[in-house]
Amino acid sequence: MPDIDTAASSLAAEVAWYAGLPSMYGSGAALFTDPAGRVLLVKPNYREHWTLPGGILEDGESPEAGCRREVAEEIGFDVTPGPLLAIDWKPPEGMRPRPIVHFIFDGGVVAEDAPIRLQEEELDAYRFVEPGELARHLPAFMTARVCAALRGRAAGAPVYVPQLDAR
């Protein structure tokens, strides 16, 4: 018969081990393009730059579920995210004390006149942008992320976004 004290001690050690592991934040976003291949970007009212539809995952939420929820909230599309296109990891920075992992899924091709309903509390505008013009609307890290997602879609396999040289 197993020793109850040993089992409890072993369980407590495992709980303590998990509690001591590092943690990180996550986000899920979708890459939508129009039939001409232009990328759908949204303009948050709380940032200077444009971005893809999506956002921060809730506690215990999967990246796919978070992407679906955020896309529905932000632009009114109820879509099941397609294949994973890109993964981007960023170290702690500024006010964010932990790393963050960004998951970009394929949202598919949508008509330029698709009925986009912006979440007025967070978004000011949307637009479709030619891939070659992304850098005019996005910071370098976001341009790298979206370009990686486009490469992932073309290749049919996810792309890991390497860290930009901070030097």
Image (cartoon, rainbow, N blue to C red):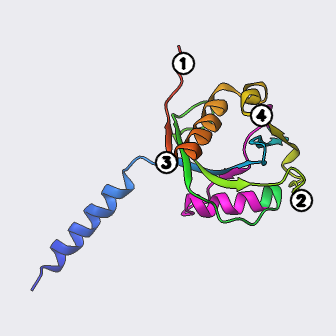
Label 4 amino acid? Glu
Residue 48 horizontal/vertical position (percent): 80, 31
Say whether marks 3 and 1 touch (CB < 8 Å): no
Secondary structure of the residue carrying numbered label 4: loop
* Location of mark 4 (residue): 130
Q: Is residue 4 magenta?
A: no
Q: Nearer the viewer, residue 120 or 97?
A: 120
Residue 65 horizontal/vertical position (percent): 61, 64
Label 2 amino acid? Pro
Q: Nearer the viewer, residue 133 or 17?
A: 133
* Location of mark 2 (residue): 115
Secondary structure of the residue carrying numbered label 3: loop
Q: Nearer the viewer, mark 2 or mark 4?
A: 4
Among numbered discs 3 and 1, the one appearing first in the sequence: 3
Secondary structure of the residue carrying numbered label 1: loop
Say whether marks 2 and 4 touch (CB < 8 Å): no
Residue visible at 50% across and 41% down in the picture: 159
Residue 16 vs residue 50: left or right?
left
Inter-mark Cα distance, 3 to 1: 27 Å
Say whether marks 2 and 3 touch (CB < 8 Å): no
Secondary structure of the residue carrying numbered label 2: loop
Q: Nearer the viewer, mark 3 or mark 1?
A: 3
Inter-mark Cα distance, 4 to 3: 22 Å
Which residue in the rendered view is the most extreme toward the top?
A: 167
Task: Residue 166: give its label.
Answer: 1
Looking at the rendering, the stretch of residues picked out in magenta corresponds to 47-72
